[in-house]
Amino acid sequence: MAVPFKYHARAQSTFEPPLIANENAFLGDVDSSDSYNPEKPMSAGFYRLEKGTPLVYEYTYDEMKIILEGKFEISDETGQKVTATPGDVFHFPKGTKVTFTTPSYGLAFYTGQRAKGAA
């Protein structure tokens, strides 16, 4: 049985993730596999952070993130700290506790091993 692919035209510029925390952290799933693969769901979307309150997040699933625009300052509980710029790729294993900040603005694309909306 043939399965069609899904297409989200110009999603980076047209999809507006909703506010999820503080006054400046936005995240939204563009798509998810949970409707046809509920036992091993995978979701993907955009994360935007604007200057303001740092976002502290503990991952309850594995996630990969690629920085698309702007700059993030990302640190974890081990003391590791990185200034992330476009093209940088991150893997946040389940259990990682991360603090995200930005001097102005940052946009990233992520893929997480979780159901849609379960971030």
Image (cartoon, grey):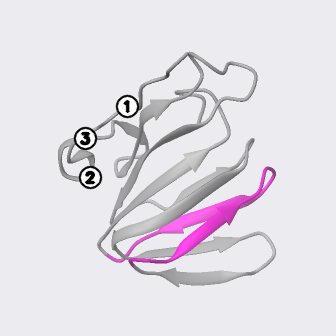
- 95 part of magenta stretch: yes
Q: Residue 19, how many percent across, how many down?
A: 36, 39
Q: Secondary structure at mark 1?
A: loop
Q: Quadrant of the C terminus?
A: top right
Q: Residue 28, how many percent across, how many down?
A: 41, 38
Mark toward the viewer: 1 or 2: 1
Residue at mark 1? 6
Q: Quadrant of the N terminus?
A: top right
Mark toward the viewer: 3 or 1: 1
Sequence order check: which comes first, mark 1 or mark 2? 1
Q: Choose between 70 and 23: the one closer to the eye.
A: 70
Residue at mark 2? 12
What residue is at 41 percent from the left and 60 percent from the top? 108
Amino acid type indicated by mark 1: Lys
Magenta residues? 86-103
Taking 37 as reference, is 73 left or right?
left
Amino acid type indicated by mark 3: Phe
- 72 part of magenta stretch: no
What residue is at 42 percent from the left and 80 percent from the top? 85
Q: CA distance from mark 1 to mark 2?
A: 15 Å
Q: Secondary structure at mark 2?
A: helix
Taking 84 as reference, is 34 left or right?
right
Residue at mark 3? 15
Q: Residue 80, how many percent across, how many down?
A: 72, 81
Q: Are marks 3 and 2 in contact (CB under 8 Å)?
A: yes
Label 1: few (<14), some (14–19) or many (≥20) C-alpha neighbours in 10 Å: few
